[in-house]
Image (cartoon, rainbow, N blue to C red):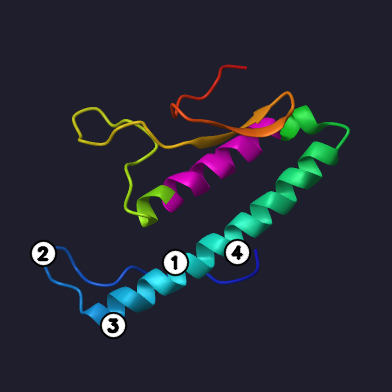
């Protein structure tokens, strides 16, 4: 894997994070997310062009879903999955493969194959 590494989160539980450290972390996280998305798009294109594209669907879907979860949390939105006993809701659009190419699942529920 090339490109920027995911930054280590600053601070400790129960202690405020100094603004410069928080801003540096968020900047590093944005760079990491952008680079990962570029890599995932290339991987998705290669998987779709493969004669055995169906064998890659689950792995690409998992990688894109994980990326979307991190992107959503970074943007300050709810987690794309429901966690019992928490206040998180399932509202994020999750990238999914459709018969016509790539789409999203606005309900956050993945279609069964």
Is 27 placed above or below 79 here? below
Q: Are marks 4 and 3 in contact (CB under 8 Å)?
A: no
Residue 97's quadrant in the figure? top right
Circle 4 residue: 35
Q: Secondary structure at mark 3?
A: helix
Circle 3 residue: 20
Can residue 71 be seen in the rendering of this structure? yes
* Mark carried by residue 14: 2
Q: Nearer the viewer, residue 19 or 113?
A: 19
Real-space Cα distance between discs 3 and 1?
A: 14 Å
Looking at marks 1 and 2 on the same chain, the residue that comes earlier in the sequence is marked by 2
Image spot of residue 108 (x, y percent): 44, 29
Real-space Cα distance between discs 1 and 4?
A: 10 Å
* Apparent side of residue 16 relative to residue 56 in the rendered image (left or right): left
Looking at marks 2 and 4 on the same chain, the residue that comes earlier in the sequence is marked by 2
Q: Secondary structure at mark 4?
A: helix
Looking at marks 3 and 1 on the same chain, the residue that comes earlier in the sequence is marked by 3
Image spot of residue 65 (x, y percent): 52, 40
Residue at point 18%, 29% (across, down): 85
Image spot of residue 94 (x, y percent): 51, 36
Can residue 6 be seen in the rendering of this structure? no
Looking at marks 3 and 2 on the same chain, the residue that comes earlier in the sequence is marked by 2
Image spot of residue 32 (x, y percent): 52, 65
Q: Are marks 3 and 2 in contact (CB under 8 Å)?
A: no
Looking at marks 1 and 4 on the same chain, the residue that comes earlier in the sequence is marked by 1
Circle 1 residue: 29
């Amino acid at each position: 894997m090339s490109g920027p590494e995911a930054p280590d989160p600053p601070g400790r539980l129960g202690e405020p994070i100094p603004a410069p450290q928080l801003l540096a972390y968020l900047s590093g996280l944005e760079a990491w997310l952008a680079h990962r998305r570029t890599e995932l798009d290339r991987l998705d294109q290669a998987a779709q062009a493969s004669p055995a594209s169906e064998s890659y669907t689950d792995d690409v879907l998992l990688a894109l879903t994980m990326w979307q979860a991190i992107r959503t949390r970074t943007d300050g939105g709810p987690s794309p999955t429901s966690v019992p006993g928490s206040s998180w809701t399932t509202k994020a659009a999750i990238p999914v493969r459709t018969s016509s190419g790539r789409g999203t699942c606005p309900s956050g529920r993945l279609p069964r194959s």
